[in-house]
Image (tube, rainbow, N blue to C red):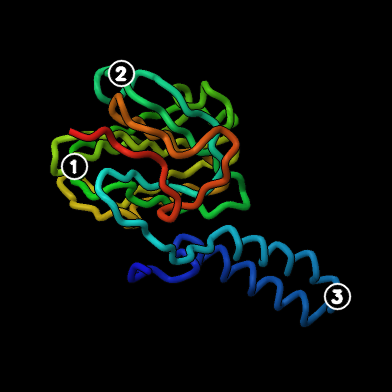
Amino acid sequence: MTNWPHPVVAREGWPFLALAAIVSAVIAYFFGWWSLPFWLVTIFILQFFRDPPRDIPQGEGLVLCPADGRVIVVGDAPDPYRGGVKSVKVSIFMNVFNVHSQRAPVDGTVKEIQYSKGLFVNAALDKASSDNERNALIFMLDSGVEISCVQVAGLIARRILCYVKVGDRLMRGQRYGFIRFGSRVDVYLPPGSVPKVAIGDIVKASSTVLAELPRP
């Protein structure tokens, strides 16, 4: 089990959770059972912003899932963030009941960050990868291999948060960002990478192996 420097409830949710709890408590004090819907909203906010620790598999060449959710794309595709080079693309869709923090899929250095403004169509649609607001991190491994990991906003998600900068060194499983209220993450891997997930699989950030990089 990795050491977990973040609270079990993500800091991004503290203001929302505090406000919901205060409102619920006030309504409960004055109106009793009429506060039940407000407590349900508070519980929903609590589960949305949960950020539990995860087991982190170790092994050379492993790429870990950067987010919780359901796999919706596995296949060859050009990487638009690295000049359209041929890549293996894996996409994970996060609904409102998934954990929404993003974690580094590999040990590596942030070589480049590309932010693009865009729309807010349903993140489960293929066109969300190119049309929606998104933030791409290009990781460079010590071997020189590069992968792109893209935070994509969704229909309800209106805020992409990224806490790293170019030159930062991240370890696999290290938390680097958060997307609020439904979204997706696209990962572009070098040709020859072997996906370890299939369309429809339910995956967990850091603890699920997404793919294995080609051996040199």
Residue depicted at x 86% and y 75%: 33
- Which residue type does callout 3 highlight? Trp
Judged from the image, the secondary structure of the residue bearing numbered disc 1 is loop
Label 3 environment density (alpha carbons within 10 Å; few <14, some 14–19, many ≥20): few
Query: Where 14 sits versus 135, above or below?
Result: below
Answer whether labels 3 and 1 touch (C-beta < 8 Å).
Answer: no
- Mark number displayed over residue 33: 3
**Nearer-the-camera pick, 173 or 34:** 173
Disc 2 marks a residue whose amino acid type is Lys
Quadrant in which residue 196 is drawn: top left
Q: In the drawing, what numbered circle is on residue 141?
A: 1
Q: Residue at x 56, y 63 (%)?
A: 16
Q: Residue furthest bottom?
A: 29
Total count of labels: 3
Measured in 3D between alpha carbons, the distance from the residue under mark 2 to the one under mark 3, in whole angstroms, is: 58 Å
Write down the residue under mark 2. Answer: 86
